[in-house]
Amino acid sequence: METNYGFLYPNHSLRVYYPSTRARLLQMSSQYRVPDNLYYTREHEWAQTLNGIVRIGITDYAAKTLNDVVYVSLPSVGQSIKQLVSFGTVESIKAVSELYSPLSGAVTRVNTELTNHPELVNKSPYEEGWIIEIKPSNIGEEQKKLLDSKQYLVLLGSLGK
């Protein structure tokens, strides 16, 4: 007897089939926004290059997982940051999470709107909720360590297993 979950065998054991990787990717891509023009870390930060400056924030997945963001600690302009090293934190009603820089460089600008409106990280993680901008110091080599949108979707799909 066939069911939606697999096949029922005479000994009444149920064999369950899990969604294929492709099905999980489709589910993740419809559940979370993952823009094609960004690079991603495995820790759920994104980076976008704009005229030699890199804008950094957290992904839609991270924003939805954190839920209600209540505070974002921002580094100082001029501060030097290293790739995949913490440069601040995001605090929500659920947890405090470290922010890891996708690339090394010097902070050129911080999103001061987040001081009074940290919820922008939840409402608009890729637009109004960006966190910092940096002048990258080694983008050529370091960008190779980041994920493109397809690789990031695969990572998200593996989290649902």
Image: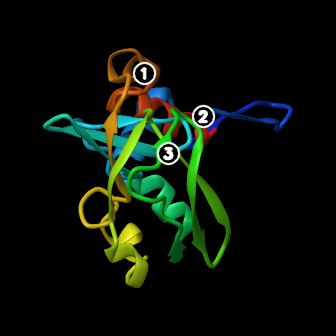
Q: Which type of secondary structure does the marked residue at label 2 adopt? A: loop
Q: Residue at x 46, y 53 (%)?
A: 61
Q: Which type of secondary structure does the marked residue at label 3 adopt? A: loop
Residue reaching furthest to the front: 78
Residue reaching furthest to the right: 11
Q: Is residue 20 left or right of residue 2?
A: left
Kindly identify which residue carries mark 2.
18
Q: Residue at x 50, y 41 (%)?
A: 81
Quadrant location of the C terminus in the rendered image: top right
Kindly identify which residue carries mark 1.
142
Mark 2 or mark 3, which has the lower sequence index?
2
Given the image, on which type of amino acid does mark 1 rest?
Glu
Given the image, on which type of amino acid does mark 3 rest?
His
Q: Is residue 71 left or right of residue 140?
A: right
Q: Residue at x 62, y 32 (%)?
A: 17
Indicate the quadrant where residue 153 lies: top left
Q: CA distance from mark 2 to mark 3?
A: 25 Å
Above or below, 155 against 77 in this view is above
Given the image, on which type of amino acid does mark 2 rest?
Tyr
Q: Nearer the viewer, mark 2 or mark 1?
A: 1
Above or below, 108 against 41 in this view is below
Residue 52, position in %: x, y?
19, 34
Q: Residue at x 38, y 22 (%)?
A: 138
Indicate the quadrant where residue 102 lies: top left
Residue 44, disc: 3
Instruction: Identify which residue, 155 or 93, lies in the foreground.
Output: 93
Colouring mode (rainbow / by chain / secondary structure / one colour)? rainbow
Q: Is residue 76 left or right of residue 100?
A: left
Q: Which type of secondary structure does the marked residue at label 1 adopt? A: helix
Quadrant location of the N terminus in the rendered image: top right
Q: Inspect this view and state whether residue 28 appears.
A: yes
Residue reaching furthest to the left: 51
